[in-house]
Amino acid sequence: MLTAETQQALQMLRLRRGTLSPTTIEHMLGPIRPLRELRLDRRPRTVGETLVLLGWLLPRPARPHHPAGWVLAPELRRWLPKPLPAQAGPVPDLSAVATAPALIATYTILIASAQRPLSIRHDRSFTGPALRRLRDLAPGCDPELWQWLLPLLVDLRLLQRIGATVAPSPAFQQFLRMTVAEKLSLLRTAWECQPRTERWLTRLRISVRGLDWPALRRRLLHWGMMVTSSGIPVDSSFVTLHASFGPLVDGTTHCLTPIRRMPWTYRSQQRVWYAAVAGPLTWLGVLPTTWAPTTTMSWHYDDQNRLITTPITDVDDDLRTVQSWLTFVGVDQSVLRWQIDTARIRRLLAGGQDLSDLARVWQRRLDDQLPGWVPTGVVPCARLITRTVLVCDTPTVLSADGCRSVVHRSLATQIAPGIALVTPGREQALIRTLERTGVLTIAEPEGQMPPPAPASFPAEAHVLPPPTQVNASSPPFVSLHPTQAAALTPVVDAAVSSDEHWCISDRLQEEGNRPAVVPAPDPARLNDTLQQVHTAIRRREALLLSYQPPQQLAHERLVQPLRIERHGERWLLYAYCTTRQAERCFRIDRILNLTRLSRNRSARQPSAKGRPQLQRTGNGGGRLSPSQPPSSPDGRLLRIWMTDS
């Protein structure tokens, strides 16, 4: 806050030892009025009076063998800051080059999210796929820079949240019109004013209690600018800055709580400074370590690779036009790279967009016309329409004589005998009508077409519903290969004639077949299973499960339940499986049947004679005793009884 003349005089006093005579002081600092006059008029007239009013230059009365004079107190001499060294060399102009990593990462995030939104977490950090995509576009950036920069762009309203993703906001166009110096100043101001903690600082395990984050960031920016303007080596910058400006933290930076001692030690302050040098100060381009000359100062087109390179220093409204027609490839230390994709241009032309904007930018920036291979006219396009296909093994089902009026109204076009397109929205009505007439409807999974096979039923129809037709209230369908139909005929007949809820996977196991899709369980049965599992966990009981894994046969597991978790619409049971001798996770909707078994807690590992009895606590009651495993008439084992060992 002192003038340059006062600072120079103060540094001269530091070099002089002992008491200075009034004549010497008057020659160095100018005349000093008596103290009684300074009390009446406190406006300093000379540099000496300024130092006296600040309390730094003190009068010393006359003593024997010591005349009167002026002295600089020893403790004040030690406290006064040391001058910074002279500037080592010219500092490059920040507006001429723009290789600050934060600015490069900002362009990458905004352009990448404009082409496809980037996914984020609830704590405003990028997900793994989003980080991998950004690293592929800008491999030279620090991996921690992306997570550090995302909250700043959201605070500046350059990015807006759309659900679990982020995309550029309308302020993106205004940001492109700014100069390089204005963009960097905007990022620095946003970083200085944000009240959130710093991950790079909390990782050092330093106490941040009562820390005023904007005050600390403001001091770090000031120190970084002093390093740049004075040409101080970065490796030894902390010692010089600490001697010139005092400690990094004090009552100003830790003003949110009373302090009775220095908040951080000298070594802790040194660690924080060098962590900031490697982090935000380098990312924001405050230090000269990030400066490098740009390789190109104008747009360039490579006809061989069909690449357009645009310098970072020349990013403006033309970037918005380019990014809509071209594909963003990546960024390096000085340029943005764009790939000319003819397929993308054809899609935009088919959508009704005009290519004149790109041609105008091409003419102004590259001083040339568009290449001849770039499509300029409207190209033919093809539309893919998802429709439901009805395939009947017996073509007479769709004939005029055997086709009912409801079925006839549900069909839009008959392609061939036994093959027709279903009218959108009439799929469920068609299925109900075919089932009432005795025709079995089987829905094949989307994207899977079974190989041609001979029909197994006299009247069988394959209905392929579109993806938007999935409805929880619709009847469940099982996708089966036609070659399995003959073996499953008794099973299906028994299921149709039964009124109770049944699971087709249980009966298919008895026949030695495996279904492709298991029907959704009954909500009432799922709730009963959850209550049984909750009771077993509360009473510390074992469970005997009849479990149906995906694409496998149902089998029994003896488990000790641990906890229940819900993930979306699914309930998961974490239990210790005695078969696998490890903890396993089971989907509760795949549990076909369960039985609670109470254990005797007298011993953890009982001997052969003193094994705990397993008691059935379900509706059946009674105790389980070792017995011979039951078998089928043909001698095949159907179930294996398991006991503790």
Image: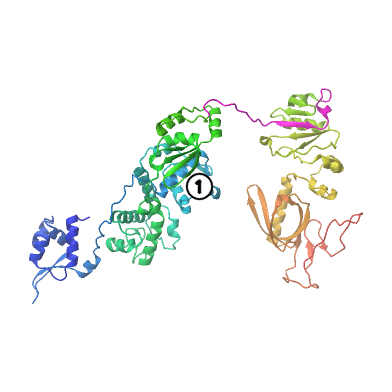
Residues 136 and 587: in front is 136
* Above/below status of 599 relative to 547: below
Residues 565 and 262: in front is 262
Residue extending farthest right:
633
Does the magenta segment cover residue 379? Answer: yes
Residue 242 lies left or right of residue 126; in this view the side is left
Residue extending farthest bottom:
64
10 Å neighbourhood of mark 1: few (<14), some, or many (≥20)?
many
Q: For residue 455, which quarter of the picture?
A: top right
Residue 471 lies left or right of residue 253; in this view the side is right
Q: Name the residue that disc number 1 marks.
A: 134
Q: Can residue 419 be seen here?
A: yes
Residue 293 lies left or right of residue 551; in this view the side is left
Residue extending farthest front:
304
Residue at image position (84%, 27%) is 396
What x and y, as percent, mark residue 358? 46, 31
Residues 327 and 466: in front is 327
Count of picture labels: 1
Residue at image position (9%, 70%) is 68
Residue at image position (42%, 63%) is 206
Does the magenta segment cover residue 312? Answer: no
